[in-house]
Amino acid sequence: MLFIVVTIWLIFFAYFIDFRKCYLALKMPGPMPLPLIGNGLMFLNNTAAENFELVGRLKRTYGGIVGVWLAADFHALLSDASVVETILSSPKHIEKSGEYNYVKPWLNDGLLLSKGSKWFQRRKILTPAFHFKILEQFVEIFDAQSRILVETLAKYDQKTEVEMFPLVTLCALDVICESAMGTQINAQQNSNSDYVLAVKKIAHIIHMRMFSVLLRENFLFRFSRLYSEEKRALKTLHDFTDKVINERRNAILTNNSEHNDKKSDSVDESIGMKRKMAFLDILLQSTVNGKPLSNSDIREEVDTFMFEGHDTTTSGITFCLYCIAQYPEVQQKCFQEIRDVIGDDVTKPVTLNDLNNLNYFDLVIKETLRIFPSVPLIGRELQEEVVIGKYTLPKGTNVVIPIYYMGHDPNIFVNPEVFTPERFLVERNTEKNNPFSYIPFSAGPRNCIGQKFAVLEIKSLVSKVLRYFEISLAENSKEYPTLLAELILIPESKINFHVKPRMYS
């Protein structure tokens, strides 16, 4: 019976994919695929949390290399660090996997999705945006927006349960809008803005498409209600970005001499805020082969920065606060370091130098991202066959790397479920792991260009909260949270906190 099923499956898919690909794929460990739908039934009618847990179960059942078919798309789940290194360190395998196509309507060919010479040119253009001189200006934004966050938290009494995730989401959205576009949307004061709601909607739709056998197909997706919802959300997102780009470009053209005289602290009247060198300004001043970037070129990069720098930092900040609240001794060490580096004046603005000197915070953030990586899964599409031991990964394979489950592997990390920031102290680190076993910001030529930005933002917001409050978990949030992988790692249910005004003595 098994022979008949496999034969039918091969005959059918021979019309659609390379027979050698089928042959090589079926030699790999993994669940037996069915004709037409592959292993799609495994994911059918699952919740997002169940799909994420299923990925972990496949790893535990079949090991570091697992083959899975979603309809005609072959996926290889790779969690062995040496195998991951082979893929991520190679300049040949820098193209993202097919799942990223569902983000394309929003981001087009921005840095996340572009490939070849376009990716190389854009990476070269954008790298200076994360120079320490630019990051220094971003730190001012982190500090100002986190001040609004603590003002919001101050409205709660000690007995009230505070759900931190939505508050941090709005704060991070304010940060990224001001950093990326140089404009303010005041999301923390206006959580029902069209732009904020559109970001939430598009993230949900992208996740639904990734795991649904039916919605993965563009033809079938067009007949779903999500298609029209996606269109409305995209119009809101793109219209907003286009408006800001046009305003910013016109301001530069009409007031160029004034801006040059007043430098970076002039006031941009067209936008109504203190003028800083935003990510958008760098793009507006950039050229490729002597030609300035078009508005569409700029929009896809700004939208990419918005996408990659908003939800990811929200996840990192929320889970960092969760870990600190769960471990009082860690919280005390963090607070003492804040007092040693920044001092006891809570009104004092934090500088880039201050944040760089919060060394214990670095360990806390690293350990948080090991247990709760903001991006739990990443993917690549192989451009040629890759031999891994006794297996050969076919050309066109969608490689999936489960960063979350690698961070929880007891074969890699001692007592992986225990929050131990000190494990990342070099002089005390006895875990001689392959560096590709810990990759919260990916690795290789296509690693996250904004990782310094992200770490500084997490440091700034978390340290600001701890300067003002002692935080603890509400009774209903002390259990390990059920997790979803909706593009980023988020808790399925609320994580509630108690905030107590910080006492200095």
Image (cartoon, rainbow, N blue to C red):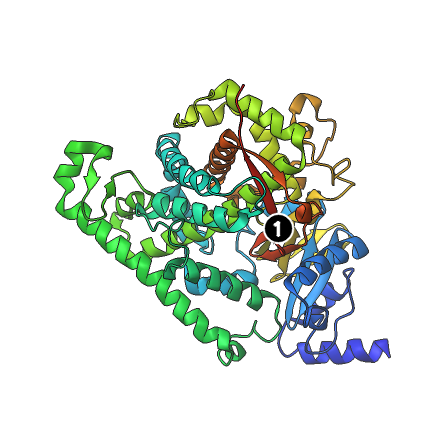
Image quarter where the N terminus lies is: bottom right
Provide residue 62's location: percent of width, then percent of height: 79, 56
**Circle 1: element type:** loop
- Of residues 433 and 273, the one drawn nearer to the viewer in this rendering: 273
* Residue drawn 74% across the image and 27% down it: 430
Q: Residue furthest right?
A: 1
Task: State left or right for residue 133 relative to residue 396.
Answer: left
- In the figure, residue 483 lies in which quadrant? bottom right
Provide residue 395's location: percent of width, then percent of height: 62, 61
365 lies above or below 21: above
Task: State left or right for residue 115 relative to residue 393.
Answer: left
Reading the image, the residue beneath label 1 is 376
Provide residue 150's location: percent of width, then percent of height: 45, 38
The answer to whether one can see residue 443 in this image is yes
Task: State left or right for residue 464 relative to residue 141.
Answer: right
Provide residue 493's location: percent of width, then percent of height: 63, 55
- In the figure, residue 228 lies in which quadrant? bottom left
Q: Count neighbours of disc 1 (C-alpha within 10 A) and say few if under 14, some if 14 to 19, many if 20 or more.
A: many
- Of residues 352 and 77, the one drawn nearer to the viewer in this rendering: 352
Image quarter where the C terminus lies is: top right
Q: How many marks?
A: 1
Q: Amino acid at mark 1?
A: Pro
294 lies above or below 161: below
* Residue drawn 53% across the image and 25% down it: 503
* Residue drawn 67% across the image and 72% down it: 45
The answer to whether one can see residue 381 in this image is no
- Of residues 238 and 188, the one drawn nearer to the viewer in this rendering: 188
